[in-house]
Amino acid sequence: MDRFDPAIMIASDPEVVGCTLGEGSALLNLRTNIYYSLNEVGSFVWDEVGEPVPFAQLVERVCREFGAPADVVEGDLAALVRKLDAAGLVQCTHQ
C-alpha cells in the first residue's frame, strides 16, 4: 500500500452524525441513510476528526492513546481513513 500523505487534513463530513455505543460508535451518513459501526479505535479516530487534523498528528494521537508503534498505526490508520473517505464519512483535503 502506498503511503498516506502526512499533511493531508482529515475532518468528519458535516452530513454524518454519530453516537457512542459502548466502546464504539454508530455513524449515519445523512446523504445515503447508511449506518456504519466503529470499534473503540475507530470511535477514537472519529472523535479526533471533529475538527480538521493532519494525518501525521492523528497518527501521533492514536499512538499515544493506545500505546501502539507508529509504523503499525500509520498503516492501519491509512486503511481506515481510506474506507471512511470512500463511504463519504470524512473529507480529506490538501493544505
Image: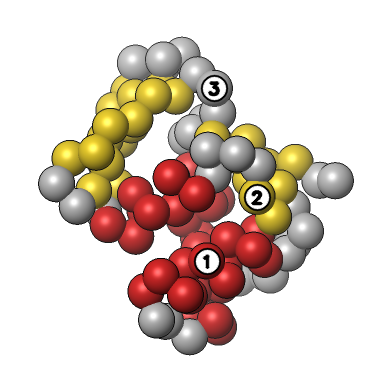
Query: Which residue occupies the foreground of this view, 29 or 62?
Result: 62
Quarter location, residue 52: top right
Identity, as a three-letter code, of the amino acid under mark 2: Val
Quarter location, residue 41: bottom left
Q: Is residue 10 left or right of residue 82?
A: right
Mark 2 vs 1: CB contact within 8 A: yes
Determine whether 30 is above or below 22 in the image: above
Give percent across and percent down for residue 64: 47, 75
**First in sequence: mark 1 or mark 3?**
3
Identity, as a three-letter code, of the amino acid under mark 3: Pro
Give percent across and percent down for residue 47: 43, 45
Residue with the most extreme left position: 22
Mark 3 lies on residue: 14
**First in sequence: mark 2 or mark 3?**
3
Mark 1 lies on residue: 61
Determine whether 80 is above or below 92 in the image: below
Instruction: Tell me if residue 95 can be seen.
Output: yes
Q: Secondary structure at mark 3?
A: loop
Total of numbered circles in the picture?
3
Give percent across and percent down for residue 8: 74, 52
Instruction: Tell me if residue 76 can be seen.
Output: no
Q: Residues within 10 Å of mark 2 (few under 14, many from 20)?
A: some
The numbered mark at residue 53 is: 2
Q: CA distance from mark 2 to mark 3?
A: 15 Å
Determine whether 44 is above or below 4 in the image: above
**First in sequence: mark 2 or mark 1?**
2
